[in-house]
Amino acid sequence: MLDRASESRKDRAWVQQQWERQHCRVFVLRHDKSLMRWRDRDADQPEVVHVAQTEVLELAPEIDQLVFLGLDDSGPMFALDVSHHHDDRLAAFVSDSEFIDLRDVGWLLDKQQAAQLAYARGLLFWNRSHRYCGICGSPTRSENGGHMRRCSNSDCGRMHFPRTDPAVIMLVEDHSNPSAPRCLLARNSRFPSRMMSTLAGFVDPLESLEETVAREVYEECGIRVGNIEYQASQPWPFPSSIMLGFRAQAETLDIKVDGVEIEEAYWFGVEQLRDFGEWGDGGQNFSLPRRDSIARYLVESWIAENS
Ligand SMILES: [Zn+2]
């Protein structure tokens, strides 16, 4: 479990002390991709590379260029963004490793490691995209171990904090025939062909989460829903969202896909879902969402409850 030390990290001297500790480890990221190596390429087993603090000193002489992630049983953990470093300076520790997109391999990693990498990616992305003040346009400076940026213009001085964009994701169920419950799954035009998933969408300003669920389901599939209940959440650092998972009851059943975002949508019973293939298996059947997604959790918990 990672202790984010959210109070201690406000003290710059304390963060510097953590950086100088012997067992300090650093995640290295470049353009949102994380440094990893393949343990066994045939088995598709990626391994996160923790670089020792001494190895990156040459690349990051200033604490301001790092973000502090937290402390675990092995010591402090930082992340370093090398998006603007030249290849030749990186070559030394990239030799048997490569920069890999977490989105492509996250489901193959240990859950805790994937969560730490997602956190590093999200925080570095925020720092990289908030180098200037949104109020007065002056450069900002990193504080709180990279968890806040303050405008350098003393007449402004605005503090900027990382933002999270809420998105809802929902499994719509139909219990009109109690002996044959069904759930609504759809294929977004951005999905791999054959993959079916739950509906999802971003929360509009000043909209409640329940209103977003009802609006998105109606806009994408023409179904009216009620009895909307929260289930679980998942941070989604692509680039800075949190997916809030719901279940909703269908009040109407005729599907009318929008044809833009959603290409096809159907009602599926438990037995049909059991015949679905695995994400990325290349088979001819419909497939389930990837194993590390909240969509998969929503579908699997629905199957378990209705079996
Ligand atoms: Zn400013």
Image (spheres, rainbow, N blue to C red):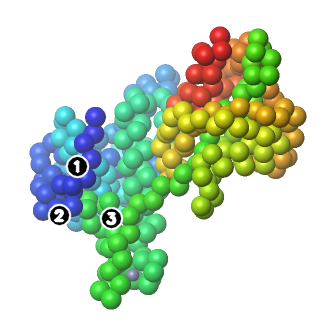
Tag 2: amino acid: Arg
SS at circle 1: loop
Is 62 situated left or right of 291 in this image?
left
Within 8 Å of ligand 1, the CB of disc 1? no
Residue lying furthest front: 227
First reached walking from the N terminus: tag 2 or tag 3: 2
Instruction: Decide: few, some or many residues near mark 3? Use Cα within 10 Å; few <14, some 14-19, many ≥20.
Output: some
Residue under the image location 78 percent in, 48 percent down: 219
Residue under pointer 1:
5
Q: For the view shown, which residue lies furthest in the bottom direction?
A: 155
Which of these two is toward me, 279 or 305? 305
Q: Quadrant of residue 198?
A: top right
Q: At 62% from the left edge and 56% from the top edge, which residue is drawn? A: 207
Q: Earlier in the sequence, mark 1 or mark 3?
A: 1
Task: Specify whether 140 is left or right of 236.
Answer: left
Q: Amino acid at mark 1?
A: Ala
Q: Quadrant of the N terminus?
A: top left
Judge by depth and name the residue closer to the eye, 296 or 215: 215
Spot occupied by residue 206 in the image (x, y as percentages of width and height):
59, 61
Is residue 177 rendered to the left or right of residue 84? right
In x, y percent, where is residue 88? 36, 58
* Label 2 element class: helix
Residue 67 point in image, percent of width and height: 30, 57
In the image shown, does 295 or 96 lie closer to the viewer? 295
Q: Is residue 275 visible?
A: no
> Would you name the residue on which mark 2 appears?
12
Q: In terms of image quadrants, where is residue 160? A: bottom left
The residue to which callout 3 is attached is: 148
Pick the quarter of the image with the C terminus: top right
Residue closest to the eye, 12 or 249: 249
- Residue type at mark 3: give it: Met
